[in-house]
Amino acid sequence: MPYLSQVEPTGSFRPFLLFQENFGFIPNLFRAQTLLPRVIEVEAEIAGTVLLKPGALSRALKEMLLLTVAAHNRNSYCVTAHCRLLRDLGIPAARITSLIADHRQAGLGEEDAALIDFALKLARWPTHIGRGDVEGLRRRGLEDVAILETIVVTALTQFLCTLSTGLGVRPDFEPVPLPEARPSRSPPPRAGEDSAVCDGQTAEPYLRALAVQPESFPPFAFFRDSFGFVPNIFRAQTLRPDLVEAEAKAVGAVLLSQDILPRTLKEYILLTVSAANLNTYCVAVHCEMLRNLGIPIERSDRIAVDHRNAGLDPREVALLDFALQLALQPDRFGVADIEALRGPGLRDVEILEAIVMVSLTQFLNTLQMGLGPVPDIHPPRVFPRQSADSAGDMNLSAGPSSLTDGGGGPSGAVDPDRDFVTRAREGDLEAFEHLVRRHARCVYRTVVGITGNEEDAEDAMQTAFMKAFQHMGEFRGTARFSTWLVRIAINEGLEKVRGRRAVESLDWDTPDSDDETGYRPRRLEAWTDDPERLLARRETRSLVEAAILTLPPKYRVPVLLRDLEQMTTEEAAAATGLPVATLKTRLLRGRLMLREALAPHFAAGRRD
């Protein structure tokens, strides 16, 4: 029996009629959602648009994509349903069995096999999908619309698998046996340039798209009116406007409805699951949506990093725990997770809507990873607008141009070093020595965080102070002196590591969607104390510092500056030469990595 109660739709329910007409049966997956008929209607429209409407891919290939991804997910419900649909399409039983066990043994054509490989990589290692994967498909002669349809089918599969797991539905037919689970493999290597963002410099999304204005396309007008902008994740799909239309209806029916769960709680679910999936695009978008709903950005940040320490009420915490369990550990999800929500008094219809929200998040996260859209949210630049001649000041390379300050601190804030800086610029060595003593600790900790060893850090620190003294005349005072100084120190630390490139990789310059280690947080337990109070204790601080040094440099430095040196976000962004949005992205991911590393020391009440 499914986990949640059901009702019989009144009269002739159009989605059920369409399922019967097109599939020959009404899937139990949709019968289990009859508490929310509006949701069934939009799900039926998406499924029909993706699978049934003619496009670049044949119906049989779409079903094969869905089957192989569902088999990878070990989702018995979806495997059974789509085996039946492939048999109805005339696909031989032997080929279907091969698709489940190993699609490379199924006698597929080169292009079909390449699309299935791509879909499996997107489903299993979404953070390792990049522009190179798309270019590889193009070199095989595949057009962008075929690649787009493959991405959407994969996203739909993730949606259906999550939905069937959360609802606990039994297969519609005799279950198809699944092969034994394969041993986990290391993530495949990345393929070429793979991010739409490189330190704030936008690139094109992976696929070609049509220029469409909201005035001429109702779905875009809907997004603009609902959110204040048209998310680029939808602009990237305009080769198939019917898909965008179906997705817009789903967003309206699931996310924007207010009759069951409040909109803010749905955004919390989307934010929490996206953060756990390391989908920084969706994190940024939904932090902005929460801000528009009156939720302070600081609270959204805390929810993304650790919802249990974000000041939420117990009911909200329980729902977010539930969402993470369903999204990250579907193989361990069961009726006990449903009962855990009934304890706080949640009704079946509320639990159902939460399951649908998690499923929608998995759909959107998969779409975004496959499409590589340019970020929508561009906060105001920290740096003042400069002439073309000074544009080079924005980079992190060493040299005179990078030693000019770039703006930063709050408007009107008084720099505590102002008087000593003025004297140092006039040649007062004692004033400069005071500045050295005052900031040596911060500078040293920053460069040791980049270089990873004390010897290089000491050399970089000395060079940084020497260059700061030599270039004091270039400090214009539009940022704090400490911000300018740390910027110089970061440059020197990076130069030290660049000198070791032959034996050590420097990942500071890699795009933010890069995730060379395949990191995906799995342990997000609450700590027994507030991290800020823990950091104040000497013995704990030592432990935290050691853990920070294990982070990749591009995440290590933002954590050092914000959480140990207590710089503001704007100051840390100015010091690193990064836009605020990029700094926040790296800080979020660094905090997630740090929490994962420290969980064994501070987690309480850990579940088995």
Image: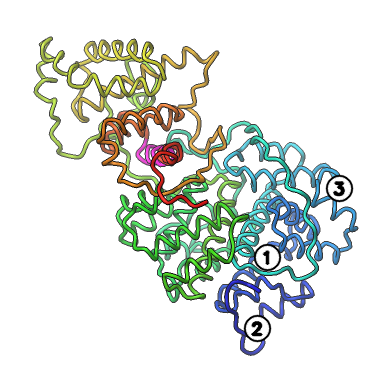
Amino acid at dot 1: Thr
Circle number at residue 13? 2
Q: In the rendered image, which residue does mark 1 sit on?
A: 49
Query: Around disc 2, counting alpha carbons within 10 Å, would you say few (fewer than 14), some (14 to 19), or many (20 or more)?
Result: few
Question: Residue 501 placed where, x, y %?
Answer: 52, 15
**Residues at marks 2 and 1, CA–CA distance in whole angstroms:** 19 Å
Task: Indicate whether residue 31 is drawn in magenta.
Answer: no
Query: Around disc 1, counting alpha carbons within 10 Å, would you say few (fewer than 14), some (14 to 19), or many (20 or more)?
Result: some
Q: Nearer the viewer, mark 2 or mark 1?
A: 2
Vertical relation: 521 (above or below) 392? below
Q: Nearer the viewer, residue 530 or 238?
A: 530
Element type at marker 2?
Answer: loop
The quadrant where residue 382 appears = top left
Question: Residue 274 placed where, x, y %?
Answer: 49, 51
**Residues at marks 2 and 3, CA–CA distance in whole angstroms:** 39 Å
| Among numbered discs 2 and 3, the one appearing first in the sequence | 2
Circle number at residue 41? none
Contact between marks 2 and 3 (CB within 8 A): the answer is no
- Considering the image in quadrants, where does the N terminus appear? bottom right
Magenta stretch: give its range.
Answer: 579-590
Vertical relation: 319 (above or below) 524? below
Residue at x 68%, y 52% (from the top left corner): 73
Amino acid at dot 2: Phe
Q: In the rendered image, which residue does mark 3 sit on?
A: 106
Task: Indicate whether residue 582 is drawn in magenta.
Answer: yes
**Residues at marks 3 and 1, CA–CA distance in whole angstroms:** 27 Å
Q: Nearer the viewer, residue 144 or 372?
A: 372
Q: Nearer the viewer, residue 353 or 11?
A: 353
